[in-house]
Amino acid sequence: MDDRPVWFAPKRFGLGSGLPVSWQGWLVSATYIAVIVGASIAFGHRPILLVATVVPASILFLIVSARTTRGGWRWRWRDE
């Protein structure tokens, strides 16, 4: 039995996460968007700082969403 939390639904087609299914998933998604928008505004004219902020935030978001997707990340083809 898998004891991991479920914050995101799996995608119907392909690999990855779909929409959030819990408030924690929505909070993580909103925080990620806020970080990206904030970094774009703050570091819009400094591309190195922008990349240095966006890349780690994106990696962290992908790790969290992969670990908290119902059934994990795997290739999906329709409803199985």
Image: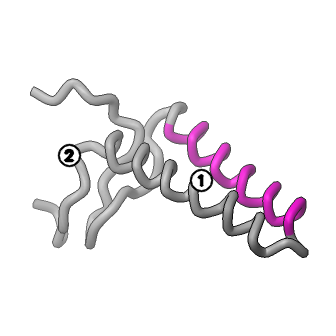
Q: Residues within 10 Å of mark 1 (few under 14, many from 20)?
A: some
| Neighbour tally class for label 2: few under 14, some 14-19, many 20 plus, Cα within 10 Å | some
Residue carrying label 1: 57
**In what quadrant of the picture does the N terminus appear?**
top left
- Going by the numbered disc 2, the residue's amino acid type is Gly
Name the residue at 89% across, 60% down. Answer: 42
Q: Is residue 20 left or right of residue 67?
A: right
Judging from the image, what secondary structure is the residue with disc 2 in? loop
State the extent of the magenta-drawn residues as a range: 25-43
Mark 1 residue element: helix
Judging by the rendered image, the residue that carries numbered circle 2 is 71
Q: Is residue 65 above or below residue 80?
A: above
Question: Which residue is at 47% across, 46% downward?
Answer: 20
Of the 4 image quadrants, the one containing the C terminus is bottom left
Return the x and y of residue 30 as percentages of the image width and height. Answer: 66, 46
Would you say residue 36 sits in the magenta stretch?
yes
